[in-house]
Image (tube, helix red, strand yellow):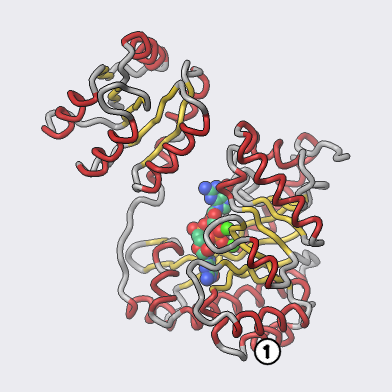
Amino acid sequence: MKFLLIDDEPFALKLLSRQLANLGFDQVVAMEHPRDALAMLESGSDSFDIIFLDLQMPDMDGVEFVRHLVRIAYTGGLMLVSGEDQRILHTAETLANAHKLRVLGALHKPVNPDQLKKAIAAAPQQHEKTARKVYAPDELKQALNNRELINYYQPQVDLGTGRVVGVETLVRWQHPVDGLVYPDQFIGMAEEHGLIDDLTRLVLANALAQARRWHDMGVPLQVAVNVSMDNLARLDFADYVAHEIAKVGIPLASIILEVTESRLMKDLLTPLDILTRLRLKNIGLSIDDFGTGHSSLAQLRDIPFDELKIDQGFVQGAHNYAPLRAIVEASLAMAQHLGMKTVAEGVESKLDWDFIQNTDCDLAQGYFIAKPMLADEITSWIPVWESGLPTLIKTRS
Ligand code: C2E
Ligand code: CA
Ligand code: CA
């Protein structure tokens, strides 16, 4: 791997170069002047896997440099480094992410060697979802007809006991040529082109059939299914869902619909009608990605949700970042006042797990526990997870 370090302090450059050398990386170019670094990148004379960028520099600050990286379409990784207040570092990271740069981390100066090692080790994982292709509505339509959409399931565990209590259904497209395609590549398109009703019906039908199989095996998992706001435009949706659940013969309460409002709804009355009736029928309703976009306080006021999912953007890193901790704790307190169950999403590391275990959040979901998997894998995974519990669960007060 080849690194470019940009920092106006020669000492900081030396220190970081030494730390990288200690980790076995010797292809390092260090530069004091961001304008020189930019000129070099623009000339294309050299290319780098990771740029370490100091935020505070006199002739061009890191935020401005990030803007130039976007302009020249830099595709490598970016590591932000700063001696500044953690919130500035965090905001700069958000900004660079919003520009779709591949941000690998934000490191506080002086850089801790362990953190450096971890941030670099995590780098290749960021490549995982990079192959993006744009699909035409007709291709998805055909995939729906051919039943190429399959459900993955991600476990949710009780934070008090560690036991697996449910799963979230996450759809993937098993593309005959491209392999596994993730939902962020087709859900938005399905919504825009009127395919989301068919998609949700297929996902729900498969999830219900699977829920039934788990019940029959004596593993009565709660099954959550994602529902788009666009599914809530037809008044018969509540009856349709209740009917489908009755058809497979499982308790209505074992199904939870996760709703997230990704864009502003023109007609609010129809979704409100449907959601209220779903609750009256005792089907679980979860507010997804809580705290982001339109998934917020106004929705809690207006819609009778009984579960709140704290967005992973608040959960990850809350263990060492006070503003996130404040947001998670306030969300949990509010949910508790409203009598709602709480789920922490995106519990990705042991540190995230330990943090959330020390709150009174009810359930956790995330890569630390397990990645989404096929239905058959769930039943063999459960005993493996549960055998590791004694070391993971602290008694909660
Ligand atoms: P979501 O509902 O917020 O689902 C959670 C996403 O976070 C999933 O991505 C999951 O794989 C990922 N995730 C889980 N744990 C972790 C973690 O520890 N770290 C990180 N970095 N990510 C984690 P996925 O499966 O790619 O789904 C993306 C989004 O697509 C979902 O976000 C949901 O909004 C949408 N989606 C998925 N399936 C369906 C569906 O059947 N219908 C609809 N309408 N939307 C769906
Ligand atoms: Ca969800
Ligand atoms: Ca979510």
Q: Residues within 10 Å of mark 1 (few under 14, many from 20)?
A: some
Residue 315 horizontal side relative to residue 6, left or right: right
Secondary element under disc 1, as helix, strand or loop, is helix
- Taking the image in four quarters, ligand 2 sits in the one at bottom right
Give the quarter of the figure containing the C terminus: top right
On the question of residue 43 being in view, the answer is yes
* Residue under the image location 43 percent in, 67 percent down: 174
Q: How many numbered badges does the structure rendering display? A: 1
As shown in the figure, which amino acid type bears the numbered disc 1?
Asp
x and y, in percent, of residue 220 in the image? 78, 67
Q: Quadrant of residue 69?
A: top left
On the question of residue 152 being in view, the answer is no
* Residue under the image location 44 percent in, 79 percent down: 144
Q: Quadrant of residue 180?
A: bottom left
**Viewer-proximal residue among 268 and 360:** 268
Would you name the residue on which mark 1 appears? 239
Residue 338 horizontal side relative to residue 193, left or right: right
Q: Is residue 105 above or below residue 362?
A: above
Give the quarter of the figure containing the N terminus: top left
* Residue under the image location 40 percent in, 76 percent down: 192
x and y, in percent, of residue 364 in the image? 69, 50
**Viewer-proximal residue among 266 and 344:** 266
Q: Quadrant of residue 227?
A: bottom right
Q: Is residue 382 above or below residue 351?
A: below
**Viewer-proximal residue among 383 and 145:** 145
Is the shortest distance between ligand 1 and the CB of mark 1 under 8 Å? no
x and y, in percent, of residue 66 in the image? 30, 37
Residue 157 horizontal side relative to residue 54, left or right: right
Q: Is residue 280 above or below residue 14?
A: below
- In the rendered image, the residue lying farthest to the right is 397
x and y, in percent, of residue 387 in the image? 77, 43
Q: Is residue 99 above or below residue 183?
A: above
